[in-house]
Amino acid sequence: MLCGMMSAVNTEILMDVWQRLLADPHKSWVLFEHGTCVVLMAPDGELAEQATAILREFGPVHAGSSAGDFGVIDLEDAEGWVVTGHHNDVLTYVGPDEAVDQSEITVGLFGRSKRHRDGTELHVVHVEDRRGAADPA
């Protein structure tokens, strides 16, 4: 039952959500297959590689450690939630139709499981490179 729901949010919907949530024109970010977004506060070199390195370290869930922690943000600019983890710039989107119920614990655990999948599969689906967007000094 859960596996079918994992594919409920497609890449175009995810890109649209993250473009609205990360409206700052100077923030570069990388989107992974299951809805995890890595915001690159200091984008450098190949963005997909940089984001993959962060997610490889901070995506997988390790029970009993800070890697199992999560927070849930109820979104104002989009339907659904963002689930945070132990790295401030690793965020996972959970759509309104994905979670079995809308309790914070259910949404958080579901988002954490999506982050774990992204952190182990590491499949980049979109790179938003906004390094050139900065106004020249």
Image (cartoon, grey):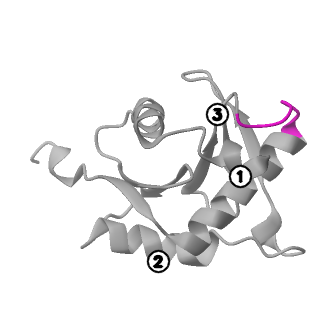
Residue holding disc 2:
53
- Three-letter amino acid code of the residue under disc 2: Ala
Percent of width and height locating residue 111: 71, 49
Q: Secondary structure at mark 2?
A: helix
Q: Nearer the viewer, mark 3 or mark 2?
A: 3
- Three-letter amino acid code of the residue under disc 3: Gly
Of the pair 31 and 137, the residue shown nearer to us: 31
Kindly indicate the quadrant of the structure image that contains residue 120: bottom right
Q: CA distance from mark 2 to mark 1?
A: 26 Å
At horizontal 46% and vertical 65% (from top left) the residue drawn is 123
Of the pair 35 and 89, the residue shown nearer to us: 35
- Specify the segment rendered in magenta: 98-104
Left or right relative to 130: residue 101? right
- Three-letter amino acid code of the residue under disc 1: Cys
Kindly indicate the quadrant of the structure image that contains residue 12: top left
Q: Nearer the viewer, mark 1 or mark 3?
A: 1
Which numbered disc flags the more N-terminal residue, 3 or 2?
Answer: 2
Residue holding disc 3:
95
Percent of width and height locating residue 100: 84, 36
Q: Which mark is residue 3?
A: 1
